[in-house]
Amino acid sequence: MREKIAACRTWVVKIGSSLLTDAGLGNGTSLSPGPGLDREAIAGWAAQIARLREAGLKLVIVSSGAVAEGANRLGLGAMPRELRLQAAAAAVGQMGVIEAWESCFSKHGVRTAQILLSHEDLSNRTRYLNARSTLTSLLKLGAVPVINENDSVATEELCLGDNDNLAALVSNLINADVMVNLTDQDGLFSADPRKNEEATLIGNARAGDPALDRLAGAGGSLGRGGMITKLSAARLAARSGTHTIIANGREADLLPRLREGAEIGSWLSAENEPVTARKQWLAGQLTLKGSLMLDAGAVRVLRSQGKSLLAVGITATEGSYRRGEVVACLDASGTEIARGMVNYDSGEVAKLLGQDSSRIADLLGYAGEEEIIHRDNLVLAC
Ligand code: GLU
């Protein structure tokens, strides 16, 4: 599986707070923000990334550490739990995060660019397209974008949550070939290595393999993401055909060695065909405006034949949504099997439940699209 790395031209490198802010404090026990940014480590990754860039690769960094660094700079003594305090700490700490990357990269003559993304930037189609073209332009210009969540404006309901998820969405945004998720652990293990001596490293697997679900344990105290979020990020990344590597960021010369195919960390391969950009955007929608309950026939047709969703297969609608918004499609047990952009408002869908498409004009008084969700605007859950 590792041979595929040779063909990977675009990399997203995600570095977690526990690595960036020094002293192994991401061990799950300490709530201290620690002694601040580990500049030596940052200089090391910058040097590795500069080398890969010279070899012709395009690289984007997703860097955490803003909240932890801010808490440290403000002398808070503990990682803030309250959202507004986290936002304030992030605003202070982001200065340090960016300054550290910029100064480390400037030694290699490499320009960095700061991009702070919020939920809305990825959930609104126009802003999504803007973010994509800015990132693509930066890569063409040879700059290294350093991305973080815009924590200082995030709200509880509308935050991307953790940078694992953010890195996956960024991978989708730019169709990255590989997402390297650097953490303070050696990869994904068969059991929690901190509790079980017999735990073995999963070297290579398919990101979509259901057997991986029970392997992922909980996260450390500094970053928000644990192995569970790393696994679901790998699956989200796989939707754009992006492979994932989860590896220990403290390994010497890690990135160039990975590039040479070294068997370090866990390689989670994206086996599925990359889906179109529109479908990736749909898949990344975190706020769904409602849901449609499908009968068994519709579930089968969607899953196996890749067809559009018609009113005849819908048994119920929930939530208040408008044409063009994204809803979940659920089977009878409530499991999400797909999500898509609806052609009708929720009130209209309620009138069309179970009906043949030929009756739409009679029931609504006008003839809209034949489908409730067109197959081009529908993406199946993994
Ligand atoms: N965006 C947060 C920060 O920079 C980190 C989120 C995470 O660790 O996943 O502090």
Image (cartoon, grey):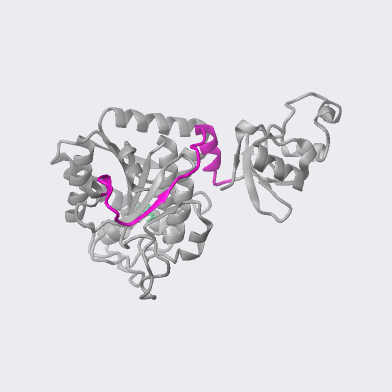
Q: Residue drawn at (23%, 60%), measured in percent from left and top?
A: 36
Q: Residue drawn at (37%, 48%), measured in percent from left and top?
A: 1
> Visible in this render: residue 233?
yes
Q: Magenta span has 244?
A: no
- Seen from this angle, which residue lies furthest right? 362
Residue 113 position in % (x across, y down): 28, 37
Q: Foreground residue, 195 or 349? A: 195
Q: Foreground residue, 320 or 263? A: 263
Residue 231 position in % (x across, y down): 45, 55
> Visible in this render: residue 16?
no
- Seen from this angle, which residue lies furthest top? 367
Question: Does residue 45 lie above or below 213 as drawn?
Answer: above
Question: Does residue 77 lie above or below 366 as drawn?
Answer: below
Residues in magenta? 258-287
Query: Relative to 109, is 33 on the left or the right?
Result: right
Q: Magenta span has 276?
A: yes
Instruction: Give the quarter of the image for residue 243.
Output: top left
Residue 366 position in % (x across, y down): 80, 24
Query: Relative to 269, is 287 on the left or the right?
Result: right
Residue 382 position in % (x across, y down): 56, 48
Instruction: Give the quarter of the image for residue 184.
Output: bottom left
Q: Quadrant of ligand 1?
A: bottom left
Question: Does residue 80 lie above or below 121 as drawn?
Answer: below
